[in-house]
């Protein structure tokens, strides 16, 4: 019986010839990540346990991105704690304000994630790096502390769902629509304890940014990870970024999957998820005209350069509707500079949008776009739970950058194809 | 002890909203636990109480603050048909007992008095007299629980400095 791509990566990292679904293993880690919310809790546990050394200062990444630039005194204290720990242990990949970006956009950009690696992060969207053919998954702060101290972590080997992609996306349809559609099909616990392994001839037509968006939201289907095969686009992306040997794994031809889900990319339409679960999906035309108060374009899901290009192409030369506030947040400093060079920032500002320095801010109701009672946001972020972006009666409609931009101009949920 | 009952897909944003994550002290987390779906929870919960909920409990963010908030309230354990995977490992790693038992999760009602024997996996609904058998943890995970959490178990093994 063959192994899936995920199982092969985990077997190698555990020093085993093969692993079986359900098997508990201890795997070697290539990178341990934390942010300004989860790292302080990990540091406290690390120190409480009496650990004094990190396993490898080059294999830990700390990114201050959630409440930064600090929104209040308490969050400033958390950042201070993380900063002092990073300095004390000489953490190589510590990213503070000015260098930081939204962690899951930043780490691949900096070449810190490569095919075949095992990456854990005290942030649920760590699954993003599956786009590069890595095994990456979200863990908690105690796991982060254990990972920092030992470079090892326990895992239950997952079984997998094979997601077979066919055809090619139509204009104004992107990776976000693929993943929202999939979550709508299988539900928010449809891949619980499982891997989502993307495959099929449709993969090659997806850009790396589309793949990052898709892998990013594997967790919203309950998945342990969401992984793509390594192809020319992957190699092109890591070329010049990753300067260490890495190994491209592929699933065995006789790998066993719990089930297969087939998605015909040609037939996908712009898709949104209505409150209060990412599985409440509709094609946008069904809900066009729904009134909104705010649009947020950014996050680890959709704050990359292609996302901004899509949004700017729709907003350029137009005006954000009077009843709507539009906040655009490029995910990293490099993306900000690129967007400036391409005139995207100018297009957003001339349209009447606010453009921010990189931060996770509004996605988790932190700052930079928190909602009042009864308000509604169309957001390119990843979660629309009760109270996620503000008041418990506020609502989030998850959407692609194209739908978000079209909605900002229309002043209500809008179909970007019209 | 007495049961608080919730539906499916209780996410970590309602267990402890992100607006309160800027203070990770146990007392602060406990004071806001569940407030977005149950305003009265934090003020009425007592040491030894139990949360019973639907499938995929703890979905969403990886914040360990969620099981920490529940544990800091004095909650004895959480019973559900299934747990979101990061919540599952966080709970084990910090020593918050969780029990997977679909039948108990469905049948036990709010306000009933329930006792759990973790060694045998037997859940007793004292109010109705009915008992349920939960699946035991694998040996490896039991080891972490017995050590009092992941970091203690690593220290016992001497794998970190």
Image: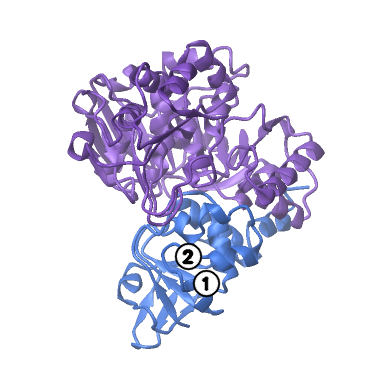
Chain colours: A purple, B blue
Whether residue B150 sits left or right of residue A203 in the image: it is right
Which sits in the foreground, B145 or A298? A298
Q: Is residue A328 above or below residue A89?
A: above
Compute the Cα span from label 2 to label 1. Answer: 7 Å
Marked residue chain, label 2:
B
Check the picture and name the quadrant holding the N terminus of chain A.
top left
Residue A224, labelled with which disc? none
Q: Residue at x 34, y 78 (%)?
A: B109
Q: Are the residues under marks 2 and 1 on the same chain?
A: yes
Q: Residue furthest front?
A: A322
Where residue B64 appears, x then y in whole percent? 57, 55
Let me know if residue A109 appears in the view.
Answer: yes
Residue B35, labelled with which disc? 2
Whether residue A397 sits left or right of residue A140 in the image: it is left
Label 2 crowd bin: few (<14), some (14–19), many (20+), radius 10 Å: some
Q: Residue at x 56, y 30 (%)?
A: A358
Q: Is residue A103 above or below residue B85?
A: above
Where residue A166 appears, x then y in whole percent? 24, 24
Instruction: Check whether the beta carbons of the residues at disc 2 and disc 1 lie within 8 A of each other.
Output: yes
Q: Residue at x 73, y 35 (%)?
A: A56
Q: In which image quadrant can residue A315 be found?
A: top left
Where residue B37 appears, x then y in whole percent? 41, 64
Of the image marks 2 and 1, the number of the one nearer the N terminus = 2
Which sits in the foreground, A366 or A175? A366
The secondary structure type at the circle numbered 2 is loop
Q: In which image quadrant can residue A251 be found?
A: top left
Check the picture and name the quadrant holding the C terminus of chain A.
top left
Label 1 crowd bin: few (<14), some (14–19), many (20+), radius 10 Å: some
Q: Which residue is mark 1?
A: B42
């Amino acid at each position: 019986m063959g192994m899936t791509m995920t199982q092969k990566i985990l077997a190698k990292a555990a020093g085993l010839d093969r692993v079986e679904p359900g098997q508990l293993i201890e795997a070697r880690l290539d990178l341990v990540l934390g942010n300004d919310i989860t790292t302080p809790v990990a540091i406290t546990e690390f120190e409480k346990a009496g650990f004094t050394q990190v396993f490898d200062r080059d294999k830990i990444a700390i990114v201050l991105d959630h409440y930064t630039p600090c929104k209040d005194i308490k969050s400033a204290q958390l950042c201070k704690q993380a900063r002092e720990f990073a300095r004390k242990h000489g953490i190589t990949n510590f990213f503070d304000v000015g260098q930081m970006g939204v962690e899951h956009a930043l780490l691949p950009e900096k070449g810190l994630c490569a095919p075949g690696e095992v990456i854990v992060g005290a942030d649920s969207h760590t699954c993003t790096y599956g786009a590069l053919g890595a095994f990456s998954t979200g863990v908690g702060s105690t796991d982060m502390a254990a990972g920092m101290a030992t470079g090892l972590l326990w895992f239950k080997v997952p079984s997998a769902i094979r997601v077979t992609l066919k055809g090619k996306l139509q204009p104004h349809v992107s990776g976000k629509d693929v993943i929202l559609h999939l979550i709508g099909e299988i539900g928010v616990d449809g891949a619980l304890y499982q891997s989502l392994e993307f495959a099929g001839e449709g993969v090659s037509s997806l850009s790396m940014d589309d793949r990052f968006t898709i892998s990013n939201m594997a967790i919203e289907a309950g998945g342990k990870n969401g992984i793509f095969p390594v192809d020319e686009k992957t190699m092109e992306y890591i070329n010049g970024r990753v300067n260490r040997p890495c190994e491209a794994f592929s699933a065995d031809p006789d790998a066993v999957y719990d089930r297969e889900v087939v998605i015909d990319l040609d037939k996908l339409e712009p898709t949104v998820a209505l409150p209060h679960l990412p599985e409440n999906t509709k094609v946008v035309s069904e809900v066009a005209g729904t009134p909104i108060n705010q649009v947020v374009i950014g996050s680890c899901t959709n704050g990359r350069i292609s996302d901004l290009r899509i949004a700017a192409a729709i907003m350029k030369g137009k005006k954000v509707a009077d009843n709507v506030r539009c906040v655009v947040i490029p995910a990293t400093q490099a993306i900000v500079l690129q967007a400036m060079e391409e005139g995207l920032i100018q297009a957003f500002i001339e349209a009447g949008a606010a453009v921010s320095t990189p931060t996770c801010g509004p996605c988790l109701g932190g700052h930079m776009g928190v909602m009042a009672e009864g308000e509604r946001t169309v957001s390119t972020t990843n979660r629309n739970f009760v109270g996620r972006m503000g008041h418990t009666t506020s609502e989030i409609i998850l959407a692609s950058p194209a739908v978000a931009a079209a909605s900002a101009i229309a002043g209500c949920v809008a179909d970007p194809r019209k | 002890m007495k049961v608080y009952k919730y539906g499916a897909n209780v996410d970590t944003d309602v267990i402890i909203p992100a607006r309160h994550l800027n203070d990770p002290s146990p007392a602060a987390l406990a004071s806001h636990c569940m407030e977005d779906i149950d305003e009265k929870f934090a003020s009425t919960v007592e040491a030894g109480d139990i949360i019973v909920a639907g499938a995929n409990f703890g979905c969403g963010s990886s914040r360990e603050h969620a099981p920490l908030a529940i544990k800091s309230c004095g909650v004895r354990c959480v019973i559900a048909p299934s747990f979101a995977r990061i919540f599952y490992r966080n709970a084990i790693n910090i020593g918050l007992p969780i029990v997977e038992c679909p039948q108990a999760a469905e049948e036990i009602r709010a306000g009933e008095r329930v006792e759990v024997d973790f060694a045998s996996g037997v859940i007793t609904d004292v109010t109705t007299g009915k008992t349920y058998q939960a699946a035991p943890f694998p040996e490896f995970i039991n080891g972490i629980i017995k050590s009092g959490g992941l970091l203690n178990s690593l220290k016992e093994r001497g794998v970190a400095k």
